[in-house]
Amino acid sequence: MPALSLIEGLGVADVVDAMMLTHPHRAHVINLTSPDPERVLLGPAVTIGYLPVRKDFMDPDKHSLVPAIYRAVQHHDPKGAVLVMASNGHPQTSVGGGTKLSRVENLGMAGVICDGYLRDFEELGTYDFATYCYGEAVRAGGNEVQPYLADVPVNLGGVTVIPGDVIFARGSAAVVIPGAEAEEILKKARMVMEKMDLAKEAGKQEDPAKILAQGDNAI
């Protein structure tokens, strides 16, 4: 697990830039919201994948959120982990709420991220963990989707997340970092950020007329 000091001052875009220098695949999730977007989310992923309800196929006692949370962390240390809940094509359906997600608090997890809606924003905002999702729901979604698989690779907003990947979320975006490379990529992201800071400082000294003249020559 990377130290929190590695993300101090970093934006998600800095880490996405560092990822692009290392891997060509999509690693970012956007259009997220949170009961408290000032909270930063960082930690290794544990996963739950949802499927559309099939009452002839899914035992509701087994395929509900509480047992799914425990299955997701069964082979992982839950302390500081991030619960990733993949809606599998149901971005406007609730996949959980404050009562069931209180287990995330009980387990000492870092937070929750999902590509669906969550209920009870006010309650979720009182917990110690960070919460990121696509929006707030008021209607339960249990008649549309149910947790089916846990501790498996999932699709989070178009990004493959493997248990053990590191999730970094801040503001309205998140990035998924391969767990074994997280420290290296976060260090690279800091270098990217510092390079951009130098470019901004250099921009204060530039002559607009000279920049325009260079553009005219290019034409």
Image (spheres, grey):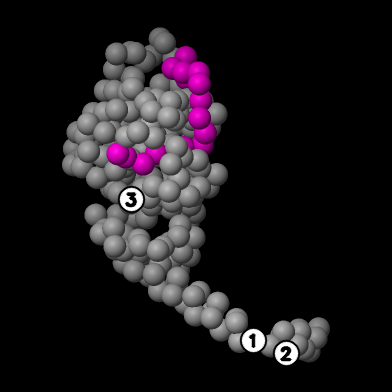
Mark 3 = which residue? 42
- Residue 217 image position (x, y, % from top left): 78, 89
Decide whether residue 133 is among the magenta residues.
yes
Front-lying residue, 29 or 12: 12
Determine whether label 2 and label 1 are within 8 Å by CB: yes
Q: Residue at x 31, y 32 (%)?
A: 150
Callout 1: SS: loop
Query: Residue 32: x and y, percent?
Result: 51, 42
Q: Nearer the viewer, mark 3 or mark 1?
A: 1
Up the image or down, 134 lies above or below 95; here it is below
Residue type pointed to by label 1 = Glu
Mark 3–mark 1 Cα distance, whole angstroms, equals 38 Å
Q: Residue furthest top?
A: 56
The 10 Å Cα crowd at callout 2, few under 14, some 14 to 19, many 20 or more, is few
* Element type where label 3 sits in the image: strand
Q: Which mark is residue 10?
A: none
**Magenta stretch: helix, strand or loop mostly:** loop
Magenta stretch contains residue 118: no
Residue 49 makes an appearance in the image: no
- Secondary element type, mark 2: helix
Read off the residue under disc 2. 210
Mark 2 and mark 3: Cα distance apart in space? 44 Å
Q: Please provide the residue range marked out in magenta.
A: 128-144
* Badge 2 or badge 3: first in the primary sequence: 3
Quick one: 192 or 128, which is closer to the camera?
128
Q: As displayed, is residue 173 above or below residue 148?
A: below
**Amino acid under label 3?**
Leu
Label 3, residues with CA under 10 Å away: few <14, some 14-19, many ≥20? many
Quadrant of the snapshot with the C terminus: bottom right
Q: Residue at x 51, y 25 (%)?
A: 137
The type of residue carrying mark 2 is: Lys
Residue bearing mark 1 = 206
